[in-house]
Amino acid sequence: MYEVNKVKISPTQLFVLIVLFEMGSSIVVSLGAEAKQDAWIAILFGMAGGFGLYLVYHRLYMYYPDLTLTGYSKKIAGKLVGNIISFLYIIYFIYIAARVLRDFGELLVMTSYTFTPLLIINALMMLVIIYAVYKGIEVVARTGELLFLVVYIVAISGFILIIASGLIDLSNLKPFMETGFVAVIKVTLTQTLTFPFGEMVVFAMLLPTLNKPKYAKKVGLMAILLSGINIAITMAINVAVLGPDLYSRAPFPLLTTISKIEFAEFIERLDVFFLLYAVIGGFFKIGIFFYAAVIGTAEVFNFKETEKLCFPIGIIILFVSISIAASYPEHIIEGLDIVPIYLHWPMQIIIPILLLIGAYLRNRNKTSA
Amino acid sequence: MLNWFKKEKRKTKFDKNDNFRQRLDPGDPKNLPLFNKAQDNTDYIKHELGNSNDIVVRQLLIANKIKAAIAYTDGLADSKVISQFIVESAHEQTDMPVGKEIFQVAKERAVALGDVSEVTNWDQLFPSLLSGETIIFIDGFQKAIKGDTRGEEKRAISEPTTQLSIRGPKDAFTESFRTNTSLIRRRIKSPNLWLESMKIGKVTQTDVGIMYIKGIANEKIVEEVRTRLKRINMDSILESGYIEQLIEDQTFTVFPTVYHTERPDIICSHLLEGRVAIIIDGTPFVLSAPAVFIQFFHAVEDYYDRFDIATAIRLLRILAFFISLVAPAIYIALTTFHQEMIPTTMAIAIAAQREGVPFPAFIEALIMEITFEILREAGLRLPRAVGQAVSIVGALVIGQAAVQAGLVSPVMVIVVSITAIANFATPTFAIAITTRVMRFGLMVLAASFGFYGILLGLIFMIVHLCSLRSFGVPYMAPLAPFIVDNQKDVFIRFPLWSFKTRPRLIADENIKRMGENQQPRPSKGGNKDG
Amino acid sequence: MVRKLLLVIICGNILFLGGCWDKTELTELAFVMAIGVDKAEDDDKFEFTYQVVIPNNIPLGQSGIGGEGVPIVTFTAISESLIEGTRQVSETFSRELYYAHTAVAVFGEEVAKSRMNEVLDLMEREPEFRTTTAVLIAKNVKAKDIVSILTPLEKIPAEKISKAIKVSEGRWGESFEVDIDEVVRALVSEGREPAISGITIEGDASSGGKKEDLEKVELPVYLKVNGLAIFKDGKFNSWIEGKKARGVSWVLDKVKSTVVNTEWEGKEKAVNLKVIRSNTKITSNLNNGVPSFHVSISMEGTISEVKAAVDLSDPIVLMEIEKALESEIKQETLDAIQTAQAVPSDVFGFGEQIHKSYPKKWKELKGSWEEEFSKAKVTVSVDVFIRRTGSRTKSFL
């Protein structure tokens, strides 16, 4: 074979991965539900914050173009502290992957697989993800390119069907900014900034695999823009179809929206569209966190054969996903109240900014010395 | 008894010769020189080939004085050519010189054939003899003349039997290596069309040729094909399938990563895209590599018909692929997991039909699908006359009796038929058979997890497809990795004049395919009166 | 190699063992096509009636699989909740009740007056229920009778009901389809009350379940979509019928097509207009903190029937007809609004309108919205455009 030894992904592939990752689970749930009909504004604000965060990650990448997050944290903070940080990130990635997996499994159990054990649903999903990650990020990226087309074709046809069924009532989006600017900002900071945009921190692990580093900035920002707009539009459609009250009460508003499609007396009950989207979205979101955890572990523990880590870490994610919460409400409360403040903020925002300051100081010293 | 005596006698005769014993040892390298005497040589050939009576040995005199002998394989060599251009011509020689020049003169004059060369050892001699060439020994020389008299019985060029087309050439490859190369050369008259040949198979010594267009084909891929072919160290190559299985990138996959066809026009179009063709003697199927997934859905007529029609048909074919892949699985998922997704009237109709059926939907589907596969397999292997009977029995058993007996529901019959017909619409057999295998996997998944199972199965399939490579080229190219320029010939076939470039990952450097401004437009000075 | 094989075997086992948890064959399900909810004699309990389809008795295609017998069967359960009722029925029935294809849920007036939302909560929460199931109120009869009646043409009575509402909505505009979601949304919203179409039985209700009845040319008993049930504080209050009901439809912009008529030269209902397109816009205003509303209706139509000598080829006459029709419709609409204000019940969602346009003021108003609504000034303007006059211009009369 004459391919390069080191895995590389193209800017297009990175773009596709970011978009699928960002939209992964966020389109499925009622994002920014506390802002009611202004959820889409909160999402756009979150997106703006996401740009800022991505610039932080990108700056770090520019300082160390060959290193992942776990790699340069050692360089910046020293071996011991760096290793601790790296280790925290690995756990963070595993935990978030498990959370997404749980979200996803709950969705299926709640909607149509009432009697099937959560473990089995999750295990099946995890098997496919393990297989993909075992094959490497290149394969995941290529799969992404293919499924990106599928997702968009499905999304656009769904959009047309929703309009054709006459479901959209734009007046549901009024009154604009009812809860006030401060409330929307609060929702942004606690929810939409960290989920999904702050989760881009995982791409700090993936950026070194990009084959054309100079595109990293442009591609990343464009992808965040596209996914942010997509999520905002989806949520706006959800509110327009369901009304703000139902939107905030439905755990999976998109499912409710899709189930209302009735077109030409025959095209109806299209829940499988939603299932299709959820499976693809979940696949990439979990897959990317999982991959980051795998390469992070390989780096911290100097493991040469990365793919051999896939199976054990995959099993860990699977079991964590089952054991993190006893019931769905508990899982959601954790997700809304605890995770954003105590987990997302430090891992997505505080540590990267500290690392950036550290990198800046180190590099300044270097140049002056 | 008599034979035994003869054998014994010959053995003793060879025993007199110095080197003979050694040569008979098994495993002994045969690149030993020939004997001095023509008689000895022919005797040795007879002996080595176990006295096979299709090896014809004949003693003759050149110009009525020089002792010589010829040997050829009956059936592979053209006996008319031999009698006319070797035997007669040898007799008719009048003034033969003496001494060492005899050999040279005999080679140049006495043997009136096109392709004549010398052989000096047995290792060269046997393959030539066994591929239909005639060997001429002359007394007193430790070498022989080899003349090309190949004229084996071969099938005439006929219509293709596997990939038919309404429009397009009607010739197909045959079992003869030379015919096959000629069919390609006749279409591409470029000096850049190169043919490298080698013999593969320790026992069968099969001719294998690599054909590519120098300057268009990616050198790396050609080299890759060459090394993979050279690596093969097997006793036999009987069909292109042997080669295919030995050179493909990954064995554990249900997807074909090498393309095979019996249509020369397809091979030519592949060559012009920069692919490498592998021609194997003894089979009408020529391989082409690298192969990408989408290529298996392209029929040759796509390029002969106008683009709009070709596109519509191509999309139809891809739809048929999906139907044949998932139709029974979706039926199972809908009727056992997602009854809410069936429109009410249809749900009640299906429920009414299933009312008396004794099997669960999955078992019902499995029985019907397996029955159908058995029918198909039976029809395939049977003599044509009996094949008709099978299909009648099948149609009656499945279509009528089973439904009337209440064993299966009419809907199931419809599903199976649609699946089967959709499967027949796949243009290449290699991918059609893959679909058949995968269908059963998806049915099991659907029976266990409904749509969730089907979706995961399909994603698994896509991940697997994306992980495949064919001679280094990603199998899902140009979809993943996505190459914008090459989208003109994937799902939608753009007009021919817009195919400005060759597939990028396949033809590496020489990408440009045509001149500018190929789009046809009415001429400005044309007759506008009409 | 061996390890891979092992992995495959393990996965395969998970699959096969995993199957069947949620698997149900079509023949194990009883499709509930309609549910009737009545109040039981015992005060705390509901009386649920399930209309279950018998697939075998629905004739299919030409071969005539299935055939004789009644296409539906009904079961009644008296219980505190729908789930409990389902369980009770299962005890007497060999199949699992399946609600995904339920087309209509009919509530008796008594239930609608008291505890309808308890049942609706389950219907909304349970994923098996489609939220697109139509909701109806049984008028003057028990919901049970509605659900148990047989109908001609449509083999499944529930289908007949849901089609009847659709036709009524599409052709007459006096009633409209409301699904579970919309009812719940209106119940939850502070600035809107639900208005649900009524259904009733014409003829002798007790004989509805006989198949022989269907064989008569003139049906002795049949279902009829009729009237709108108006709710107050989430509870059924009163009926609005006939033209007033259409007035509600006009305001809610639910009219797709209908026929309006006006008197001409002293003759009643002399000119009929077939409305082919109609559109309603509501705007709200605050005058010194007092909300007022303006409903503007515009419609296009074709003259369909003329009973007097009218020269339809004269545009001036057409304009006069338009004027007459406009005032007719305006009156209809105002009547409807007044009836609602008298209750008071904001079925038009005027409160939501204020909420959307004046969110701050809404916070003050919403506590006493019913009162505000009854006092609100509502103006109506109607624009009628006659586009065509049918295939004759002048009437032969």
Image: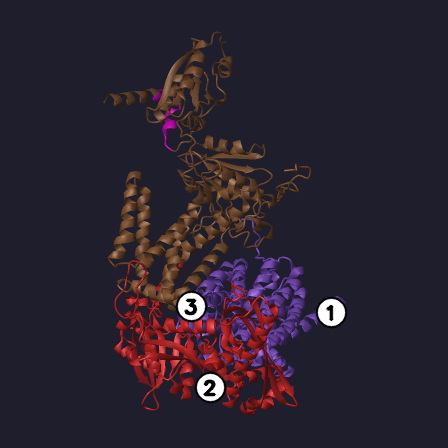
Chain colours: A purple, B brown, C red
On the image, which quarter does residue A148 sit in? bottom right
- Residue B17 falls inside the magenta stretch: yes
On the image, which quarter does residue C191 sit in? bottom right
Query: Is B275 drawn above or below residue C253 in the view shown?
Result: above
Q: Nearer the viewer, residue C219 or B386?
A: C219
Range of magenta residues: B14-26
The amino acid on which the numbered mark 2 sits, given as a three-letter code, is: Phe
Disc on the earlier residue, 1 or 3: 3
The amino acid on which the numbered mark 1 sits, given as a three-letter code, is: Arg
Q: CA distance from mark 2 to mark 3?
A: 49 Å
Residue A113 visible (yes or no) = yes
User: Does the residue at mark 1 contact the one at mark 2 (Cβ under 8 Å)?
Assistant: no
1 and 2 marks on the same chain:
no
Element type at marker 3? helix
Q: Residues within 10 Å of mark 2 (few under 14, many from 20)?
A: many
Query: Is B110 drawn above or below residue B362 in the view shown?
Result: above
Q: Nearer the viewer, residue C332 or C392?
A: C392
Q: Quadrant of the C terminus of chain B?
A: top right
Query: Circle 3 sits on which residue?
Result: A123
Residue C10 visible (yes or no) = no
Query: Circle 1 sits on which residue?
Result: A364
Closer to viewer: mark 1 or mark 3 = 3
Element type at marker 1? helix
Query: Circle 2 sits on which residue?
Result: C231
Rendering coords of residue C256 (x, y %) = 51, 71
